Amino acid sequence: MDNQNHQAPPGTNANTSVMCQLISPEGEHLGAALYLPQNVGPPQLQEIVNHLLHNEDKLPYAFYIGDEELSVQLGTYMQQKDANVEVTLHIVYQPQALFRIRPVNRCSATIAGHTEAVLAVSFSPDGKCLASGSGDTTVRFWDLNTQTPLFTCKGHKNWVLCIAWSPDGKHLVSGSKSGELILWDPKTGKQLGSPLTGHRKWITAVSWEPVHLQAPCRRFVSASKDGDARIWDTTTRKCVISLTGHTNSVTCVKWGGDGLIYTGSEDCLIKVWETSQGKLVKTLQGHGHWVNSLALSTEYVLRTGAYDHTGKTYSTTEEMKEAALVRYKKMRGNAPERLVSGSDDFTMFLWEPTISKQPKARMTGHQKLVNHVYFSPDGQWLASASFDKSVKLWNGITGKFIAAFRGHVADVYQISWSADSRLLLSGSKDSTLKVSIGNASYPCLPVRILSGIALVPVNENLLRADASYVSTFQVWDIRTHKLKQDLPGHADEVYAVDWSPDGEKVASGGKDRALKLWMN
């Protein structure tokens, strides 16, 4: 709140009015400060914001004072905080998803098929198809209507460690422990051409070029333990650019919405590359140990492309490209695309790489390595998972610390968000997610391959932690930060989880070789 005092204008009662300044998430004032009656709450504030923004279609907003969501009338809030009504109240409005996640509270199917552990699962951008990768060296596509295997795709010679759908949904690429990549046609289950070879060690991550930059999707980038990243063309089936420069394993890679590629490495550096010739644009320095994870503020719309909660389909690639561009621009707004990095040095950095080589914020507080970082789909929040047994919540724009979730009793591997940015999920090495790196079956997989988390929404304001060691899911209340309930889950360790972009379905797989579908 501002320290400046104000007198109520003629015709208003200072005792029943509150001076309020509406502010955008980027910090811009929405018009002049307003005297508002104390009986005004979030519904009335939504009307005011929609009016001031001249929105033809009324949009939902949430309101925050400081980092606390306003859920009551202004008068009640002022009374609870014992606040001075003569001091300007700064209220940040944040646009919300036009839909709410449907509660997922039961396992609707347990599907057998893989003969070894399920190591990766991923829904297509439209949420209608599901793919999985396994230690049995196969990729499988699943029929979500009949909840049975659709195609069993053979071609890899070693464990399938990661899979990734193209944002237009036309292709799926899989990477293995042997270092080769294979492109698949989801409609037929057929392998498209020969395996793509070039990497000398296993594949750690794959990221596709956004569909708003190229439609149909043709290029993707792969990262490897061998220290290189490679850009591949699906039409020529060849590596078109090698991104060399890191001196140790490339642990993560992201293809940004502005056309830049970001690679994080065990050499403690983050490198930024342009994608026409593969030239190094800049190197982001600051971490004192391995970079474990990268996340983009635009990641959700980059993954889903033109697809949204309406289920709209597109007849031409140009129509799809334009729709994806509209979604990307709307999500990004006037602010630059943001990048966050998590490291073994216990810290995170928030970057705006197109603006500066210097970090926007350095985020400290974790007591052990940061294993995973993830922006909420709306880009407003940022979550981090650490081996200090905690999950921390940060402001995704400023990097300011918001809250800590301390329910786990062991290392926390990963976190993930629901599509409406209101639910957060964490997975741990403790009884809520037992992940063993040194087990006899899969001793060499990197941590991020042996752990999986994703949205399993119960209802608004709940976050659920995936579980397997005690075969339960755990549900957390995001407002009280306390355990809510346990739900039955896998019979053994869970290695991979994903949720459909519309939030209606969740898939999980693990050591028990089964694929589970979770629905309402």
Image (tube, grey):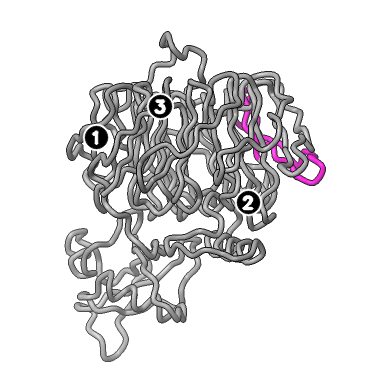
Q: How many marks?
A: 3
Say the numbered circle drawn on residue 322: none
Query: In x, y percent, where is residue 219?
Result: 70, 44
How many residues crowd mark 1 within 10 Å: few (<14), some (14–19), many (20+)? many
In 3D space, how far apart are the residues under numbered discs 1 and 2 (Cα atoms)? 34 Å
In 3D space, how far apart are the residues under numbered discs 3 and 2 (Cα atoms)? 27 Å
What quarter of the picture does the N terminus occupy?
bottom left
Helix, strand or loop at label 2? It is loop
Residue at the (24%, 26%) spot, across then down = 471
Residue at the (79%, 46%) spot, across then down = 276
Judged from this view, the residue extending furthest toward the bottom is 11
Circle nearer the N terminus (3, 2)? 2
In 3D space, how far apart are the residues under numbered discs 1 and 3 (Cα atoms)? 16 Å
Judged left or right of residue 250, residue 332 is left
Residue of label 1: 474
Write the start and end of the magenta stretch as one range.
262-286
Residue type at mark 1 is: Gln
Residue of label 2: 210
Helix, strand or loop at label 1? It is strand
Image quadrant in which you'd find residue 107: top left
Label 1 with label 3: CB-CB less than 8 Å: no
Query: In x, y percent, where is residue 154?
Result: 56, 27
How many residues crowd mark 3 within 10 Å: few (<14), some (14–19), many (20+)? many
Judged left or right of residue 80, residue 371 is right
Residue type at mark 2 is: Pro
Image quadrant in which you'd find residue 118: top left
Helix, strand or loop at label 3? It is strand
How many residues crowd mark 2 within 10 Å: few (<14), some (14–19), many (20+)? many
